[in-house]
Image (tube, rainbow, N blue to C red):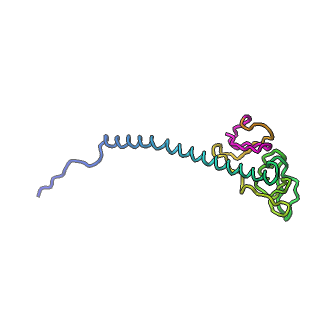
Amino acid sequence: MDIQLSNTTKGFTLVELLIVVIILAILAAIIVPQFSASTNDAKAAALQSNLANLRSSIEFYYQEHGEYPGANIATGATCGSGAAVGTGAANSQEALIAQLTRYTNDAGLACTGKDATFKYGPYLKGAIPDNPEGTSNTIVVVSAGVLGLASAAAGGWRYDTVTGEFIADN
């Protein structure tokens, strides 16, 4: 009984491996930009959604108070049952946030608790969302003028207390 051993080895040649690597590189070059475009589309959609929510909250406040949030002070209220008082001077980011995220009275003074005096709001649940394209929720408050011309490009938001205009700052 003769047993012959074959001297051939099984496996891939270097050329075959190079072809596979080249094909994978071509596929990656095609697919990666599409993921990047999807990410940009998602950021743009999130920005539009955040703008729509913030603008509708601002308009709802305007309908109930007759002026835009942030135009008046949010401090100085006497809140009942241990509720915290709002913060912020007129035309400030603090007043805008307090008046949108807390209960307010007819004058726009803000408290964390709801009662017969502080019967309006809150218009936003939680905090001001980040600008998805700038990753900041800082709001530059302007009391007059065109917002786009005075952009600080801080990556957050810009808001005019006179017109109620609210835009992304990026």
Magenta residues span 149-170
Judge left or right: residue 111 versus residue 57: right
Question: Residue 124 colored magenta?
Answer: no
Residue 85 placement: quadrant: bottom right
- Measuring from the top left, give residue 107's x and y in whole percent: 86, 53
Residue most extreme to the top: 149
Name above or below for residue 60 compared with residue 167.
Answer: below
Residue 80 shown left or right of residue 23 in the figure: right
Which residue ends up furthest to the bottom in the rendered image? Answer: 81
Tell me if 107 is positioned left or right of 14 in this view: right
**79 or 57: nearer the eye?**
57
Tell me which corner region of the image, top left, top right, bottom left or bottom right, holds residue 13. top left
* Residue drawn where x is 82% and y is 46% of the image: 71
The residue positioned 81% from the left and 49% from the top of the image is 95
Residue 94 in percent (x, y) is at 79, 49
| Front-most of residues 57 and 96 | 57
Residue 66 screen position, x and y as percent? 82, 50
Q: Which of 4 and 91 is in front in this view?
A: 91
Quadrant containing the C terminus in the rendered view: top right
**Residue sitting at x 78%, y 51%:** 62
